[in-house]
Image (cartoon, rainbow, N blue to C red):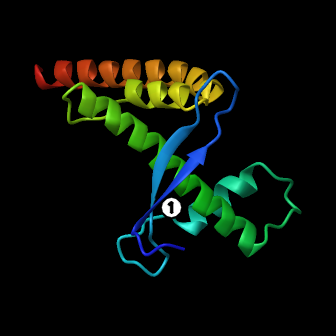
Amino acid sequence: MSSSPVQKHAIPPADTHHEPQEYLEPSTSRFDPTYQVLPIANIARIMKSTLPDNAKIAKDAKECIQESVSEFISFVTSEASEKCHNEKRKTINGDDIVFSLNTLGFEKYGDALKPYLEKFREANKNERTASGSRSDQ
């Protein structure tokens, strides 16, 4: 392994019509205080919700998912950040995440996220409208 703090990896796309995406993997470990992962209890709760009641999940399986999910979030967010940077914007929004998922070959996730994003925005719009009308009374 080189002494460089950053390693380059090529991630194969989900289908063959994309060029391989290159990303930078920070050289971090669980012992680095800046290294962030989702809490293992949250990971376990999500995993258990899809399994029969009598199923058990080994600690290494939870940790493997924890690492994978954290890396996936970083990967998608990095792509969204690059899009925002190119468009001279500072804030990543839901559309940027959908774009990133589609760009990185995760179209099924992007397509599934679109209706959720629309419902989320509609709910926020209704919430603001309702709270605005209450303050007028």
Of the 4 image quadrants, the one containing the N terminus is: bottom right
Locate residue 120, reporting x and y percent.
Answer: 43, 25
Amino acid type, label 1: Leu
Q: Quadrant of residue 135 in the image?
A: top left
Q: Which residue lies at the image location 65% right of the left edge and 25% below the top edge? A: 108
Q: Quadrant of residue 94 in the image?
A: top left
17 and 41: which is toward the camera: 17
123 and 26: which is toward the camera: 26
Locate residue 134, reporting x and y percent.
Answer: 19, 23
Q: Which residue lies at the image location 65% right of the left edge and 39% below the top edge? A: 12
Locate residue 106, reporting x and y percent.
Answer: 61, 30
Of the 4 image quadrants, the one containing the C terminus is: top left
Circle 1 packing at 10 Å, graded few (<14), some (14-19), many (20+), is: few
Q: Which residue lies at the image location 55% right of the left edge and 52% below the top edge? A: 9
In the picture of the structure, the residue carrying the numbered disc 1 is 38
Secondary structure category for the residue under label 1: loop
As drawn, is 136 to the left or to the right of 33?
A: left
As drawn, is 71 to the left or to the right of 6?
A: right
